[in-house]
Amino acid sequence: MTVKAESFKSERYIKGGLGYCVNERWPYEPCPLHWHDYIEVELVLDGEGRQNLNGKEIELESGCLTVMRPTDFHSISIGRNFHLINLSINDRILPEEILSKLSVGDRLFFKLSPADTATIAGLLGLLNSEEHQSDPDRRYIKHLVLSLFLKIIKFIPKKNEHNNQISNTIQSAILYLQMHFRENPSLGETASICHYHPNYFSSVFRREMGITYSEYLNRLKIAYAKELLLTTDTNITEICFESGFTSHSNFLRLFKEDTNLSPNQFRQNRTF
């Protein structure tokens, strides 16, 4: 059976102008393989299920917490009495210090203690309640969001720290690209986020990273395309554009340069 990664867009799932949405659900149908252009926090409150997170099969039960970034993809199969609560949130409203912690690692999945489960569920419940007020208190929401993510990053192992040889400005650029490479951000757009002139930003980026901006951006796209090729049966043309490439021929050329294989050959070499 063909497995295709669907795209879940923020304009459909995050409404109301607050930059986030909380849903408590008792789903009875499986959720197909998908990725988001926003961050999702999903906490299992009861029951049993199973998810495929970036190609890894994981059993779900009460206390299982998953954080999905725009670079992640997952699916869920439903078991008995499955009950969860999830937060969909635009990464642009999160502080950079939080995003930098969330960007580390292949996947963010945790099995929480009952006490930590209750804490995360409580914060999500408060966000859900405030979201539905007639006049939501944005300052209160800001502090709830910060408290939630400060708690979550305590579960992340303290390793893979940023390279101290890279300036804070270029680290900010890298973080932005890791979250938004599929949108194919231009050098000028990323430079403006760093408050640098494009020419100066390009020079600093190459000096500190050892490669050009476009080379780094293409590396992120190729790495993501590889993951899709290895873990889904999405057709190659769709993978090309889902990974942020705007030209199929350019994608094929860069992929061959990186792997010495065509995407089809790379997929055929995968093992199960």
Image (tube, helix red, strand yellow):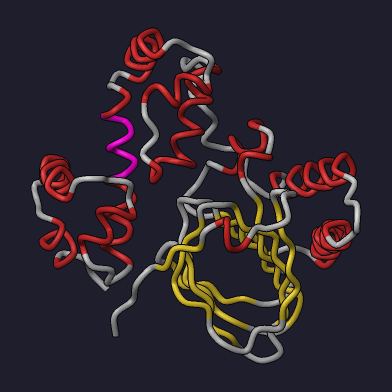
Q: Is residue 163 above or below residue 79?
A: above
Q: Is residue 17 magenta?
A: no
Q: Is residue 28 above or below residue 262?
A: below
Residue drawn 75% across the image and 80% down it: 46
Q: Position of residue 49 (x, y in %)?
A: 60, 82
In the displayed structure image, the side of residue 202 where residue 116 appears, left or right: right
Q: Which residues are magenta?
A: 215-221
- The residue lying furthest to the bottom in this view is 80
In the displayed structure image, the side of residue 65 where residue 144 appears, left or right: right
Residue drawn 47% across the image and 61% down it: 35
Could you say which is closer to the camera, residue 58 or residue 12? Answer: 12
Count of numbered circles in the view: 0
Q: Position of residue 105 (x, y in %)?
A: 50, 46
Q: Position of residue 125 (x, y in %)?
A: 85, 63
Q: Main secondary structure of the magenta part?
A: helix
Q: Position of residue 204 (x, y in %)?
A: 39, 11
Could you say which is closer to the camera, residue 14 or residue 150? Answer: 14
To which quarter of the image does residue 5 belong? bottom left
Residue drawn 25% across the image and 45% down it: 246
In the displayed structure image, the side of residue 151 where residue 110 appears, left or right: left
Q: Is residue 17 above or below residue 92?
A: below
Task: Name the image quarter holding the C terminus.
Answer: bottom left
In the displayed structure image, the side of residue 151 where residue 82 appears, left or right: left
Task: Name the image quarter holding the N terminus.
Answer: bottom left
